[in-house]
Each structure stands twice: as C-alpha cells, then as structure tokens.
Image (cartoon, coloured by chain):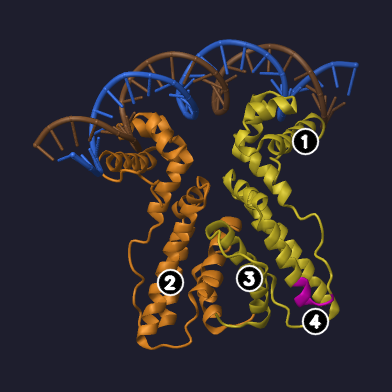
Chain colours: A yellow, B orange, C blue, D brown
Amino acid sequence: MSPKPMARPGGRSARVQASVHAAVRELEAEQGRAALTVPLVAARAGVTPSTIYRRWGDLQELLSDVAVERLRPDTEPADHGDLRADLTAWTEQFLDEMSSTAGRAYIRDALLGDPDGGNAGQCSAYAAAQVDLVLARAHERGEDGAPAREAVLDHVVAPIMYRILFRPEGLSAEYARELVERTLDGLPG
Amino acid sequence: MSPKPMARPGGRSARVQASVHAAVRELEAEQGRAALTVPLVAARAGVTPSTIYRRWGDLQELLSDVAVERLRPDTEPADHGDLRADLTAWTEQFLDEMSSTAGRAYIRDALLGDPDGGNAGQCSAYAAAQVDLVLARAHERGEDGAPAREAVLDHVVAPIMYRILFRPEGLSAEYARELVERTLDGLPG
DNA sequence: ACCTAAAAGCTATCCCTTTGCGTTAGCCGA
DNA sequence: TCGGCTAACGCAAAGGGATAGCTTTTAGGT
C-alpha cells in the first residue's frame, strides 16, 4: 500500500517509482525538505512533472510514501533473555528513533499526504510486527504473564506517539521504561 | 498561540483575523475543504491574498489555526456523581467527537500546518484541562484512588488518538470504557 | 511477432505564490 | 487632543508550480 497500486508492477513503472523515490531522498539530503518541489524531483528523477502528479497526486502523497519506507524497521528486536528486557530495549530504541528530528518529520509526512489512512496504518503495522516478535519470543521461552499485543500498542506505543505529536516536551528513556513497567505489572495510574 | 502572535492585537488585525477565519468556516461548509484556496478565502474575507500569505504563511497553517479553534471543548464535562462515571462519560464523548469524520479532519489539519507544534500542544492542553476538571471534582468529593492527570492522558487519551490517526478501525464506546476501567483499576494488559 | 491498453512524454494554459512598494490605520507620547 | 511612528494591509507584476488534452512509448497477452 505504500506505493500506489500499479496495474503493471513490472518494467518501466517500477523503474520510474524507484527513480522518483531516490530523487526525493537525494534532494531531501542535499537541500532539505523545504526546497522540494514536484518539478525539482521530476528533473532529478529524469521524468516529467506530469508523471508524478498522475501517479501520486501531489507532493505530500509522494513524501508520505517515502516517509513510510524510511519508517520501516531495518532490524529485528534484540534478544536480551527475557520479555521485560526485550520490551524495554525495544521501546527505548523505538522512542529514540521516532522522537528524533528526522523521525518526527517522517511521522508527520506519513500522516500528512494520506487520504485513506493506508500509510499511517502501515506505520502502526510495523510497530505491531516488532511487538509481536518480542511477545512470540517470550512465548517460546515459556514465559507467562505476557501482555496482549493490543495492550502494548495501547499503553506503550500510543503514549509515545501521542507525546511526539502533541506534547513535544518530556520524552526520555526513563519515560519509556515506566510505560513498559506499568504495562507488564499493571500498576494503576 | 492558536492565532499568530500579533504585535498589535486590537483593531484592524483582529478584524482581519476574524474575517478570514469566518471565511474559512463558511467556504468549508459550502464547498468542502478540497475547494479551499488562499485567493478564494481572501476574496470571501474581503482581504487580499498577500495578507493571508504574510500572516499565516500558507493555507495549511491557516487551516491549522481554524481547526484548533473547532477542537476547543465547548462544554465542561458533565457531573455524574463519581469519578468513574464522569471519566467514562467524558471519554466516550471525546472518542465520539474526535473519531467522527469532521473530528479526524480537524485533528489532521491541526497537526498539519504546525511547524513548532504549538497548535498540536493546544489540542492536548484542551484535553488535559477537561481531565483536570474531572479529577478536581473527584478530589472535592473526597474520592481517593484517583489516577494522576498524566496517567489519564497516557492510557486513555493517547490510545484513542493513536488509533484515530494510525488505526482507523476498531473504535467504539466499549473500547473507551475499557480504557477507563484499566486506568482506574490498574489491570495489567 | 502483433495488438491492446496502461503509463509516460509533451505542451499550453491557468492561477497560485511571491515580492516590492505605496498606503492606511492603530498605538503612544507630548 | 494632536501628530509621529510603525506594523499591517492593499496593490500589481512576475515567476513558477499545477492541471489537462493529446501523442508516443512500452509492457503484457494472444
């Protein structure tokens, strides 16, 4: 869903998409996102602007697609021996990446040009998959008392994302640890 | 912070702002947000486009300001006699308003044109103020065991907003009630 | 190898955006 | 109350991004 549905997934369409995505990443690194325009990206990608407008609609949807790609986790959660350590470490890394300047920008872009919510849903799916890996590992170890996937999304991931988007202050590794503790131990507020 | 800082808060500046905001609301109701353009809003407001560009920067920042206004709660949380009933009722209403088509659009707009996060922070402040009212009322009644304001934001408000933004499916009054129960009773996931 | 249709190229036009300059109007001190 | 100061607005022109019709190319199917 990240790339628009292509009736013809192979050949030229795929090359154009790759070329345009690469152009966005290059120009973003070179000149910053504020300087990005559709004609500029098109020129770098070696296509005409109308191609981009037809495939993506506007610049925001294109940036949304690229942002989702960059938000895809590139590594599996590390194995630290038990659920608590695994979840704590993953949460701290998640908070670090997402609350960075670049992370915030990608999150905003992903949400931005996203009429049907497909791209945003993909972001959540990435986090859910990572959480599932951690929980599945705990299950294999025979650990009991592991929370449900939904509980982790609601009470660990959601508070972090909410603060990133709505409350730019007060995020720390300590906060991440507290969220995990509370979810695992069930302490009331 | 919702309106841009005005070195001269009174007189013409205030009139222009009110006129422009009104024009946005009118045109949005008449023709839908997709049809909104800066020149169109300017014409309806009786100002020139350059005025809007100078004051707000671009259309998204203007829409962000208007969206924050519309997200401001217009009533105090109702009093149902005890904390649990108050918080449950408020949460259900909050979910209803925020997850509606209009609510989602306003949230997106508020987040969208918001370079410094001030508008998004205002949205969170609105919710925090409402929660504070509910908690203060419980305190006045002498109820103990009330959660901290932060706990409610993290474990009731945040999951709702996360799902609205990232997981468009699976929101219901029942879900809102579960979040409140879990926060008040401290059940683990 | 041909035929078909989807996708990209091309071009012209529209109008949004930006900018410089002149004018107005609100605020403040005398 | 009056006059000066300055921020804010109106105006107009230029530049460029967005959009649409039409043509050309390319991939996939027969």
Q: Which residue is mark 4?
A: A143
Name the quadrant containing residue A43: top right
**The label number, if any, that marks residue A18 in the structure image:** 1
Q: Are marks 3 and 1 in contact (CB under 8 Å)?
A: no
Question: Upstream in the sequence, badge 4 or badge 3?
Answer: 4
Q: Are marks 1 and 2 in contact (CB under 8 Å)?
A: no
Q: Tag 1: residue type?
A: Ala
Does the stretch in magenta take in A37?
Answer: no
Q: Dot 2, how many residues are within 10 Å of its Cα: few (below 14), some (14-19), or many (20+)?
A: many
- Look at 46% across and 53% down and name the residue there: B119
The chain carrying label 1 is: A
Q: Which residue is mark 2?
A: B131
Q: Are marks 4 and 1 in contact (CB under 8 Å)?
A: no
Closest to the camera, between mark 1 and mark 2, is: 2
Q: Which residue is mark 3?
A: A175
Closest to the camera, between mark 4 and mark 3, is: 3
Does the stretch in magenta take in A84?
Answer: yes
Closest to the camera, between mark 2 and mark 3, is: 3
Q: Position of residue B76 (x, y in %)?
A: 34, 68
In the image, taking residue B67 as reference, residue B16 lies left or right, namely: left
Q: Nearer the viewer, residue A119 or B174?
A: A119
Q: Tag 2: residue type?
A: Val
The stretch in magenta equals A81-87
CA gap between label 4 and label 3 equals 25 Å
Q: Position of residue A50 (x, y in %)?
A: 64, 25
CA gap between label 3 and label 1 equals 39 Å
The chain carrying label 2 is: B
Q: Is residue D24 above or below residue A64?
A: above
Name the quadrant containing residue A146: bottom right
